[in-house]
Image (cartoon, rainbow, N blue to C red):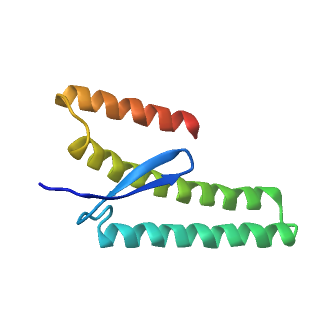
Amino acid sequence: MSRRLTGDYRLATRSFNVIEGEEYLSPESQKALVNRLSKAEGHLRAVRNMILEQRCADEVLHQVAAVKAAVSQVAATILEYEMKSCVRDCMQGSDDTRLERALKSLNTILKQT
């Protein structure tokens, strides 16, 4: 498979490459992630309104938990696609070596959350 690098982008302290002719996410996956983010936005607006209405803390915290869960699910899904792509196309070595590198990366990410 011939892949040509079309761009190098930096996001915070992490860089990633865009490869010409490859989709990062399928249209269905992209739509599912956008829908999940839309739900998180709705929950976040609800949190703002609840605070303005001086609603009980337990109700507000319940909505905060919903926002956190939705955003975490988006991050997990993106991580899944990234790891599959990277392990398949970027990493070299035996299956065990690639798995070990993937698990090490995942462990690093989980420590940061």
Q: Residue at x 86, y 71 (%)?
A: 52
Q: Residue at x 83, y 61 (%)?
A: 56
On screen, 104 above or below 74? above
Closer to us: 66 or 93 = 93
Instruction: Give left or right: position of 111 versus 94.
Output: right
On screen, 95 above or below 77? above
Instruction: Give left or right: position of 80 versus 66.
Output: left
Q: Residue at x 11, y 54 (%)?
A: 1
How many tags in the picture? 0
Q: Position of residue 100 (x, y in %)?
A: 30, 27
Q: Position of residue 14 (x, y in %)?
A: 49, 45
Instruction: Give left or right: position of 81 versus 34.
Output: left
Closer to us: 99 or 16 = 16
On screen, 5 above or below 23? above
Q: Residue 47, located in which quarter of the rendered image?
A: bottom right
Quadrant the C terminus occupies: top right
Q: Residue at x 64, y 55 (%)?
A: 65
On screen, 71 above or below 80? below
Instruction: Give left or right: position of 104 versus 40.
Output: left
Closer to us: 61 or 22 = 22
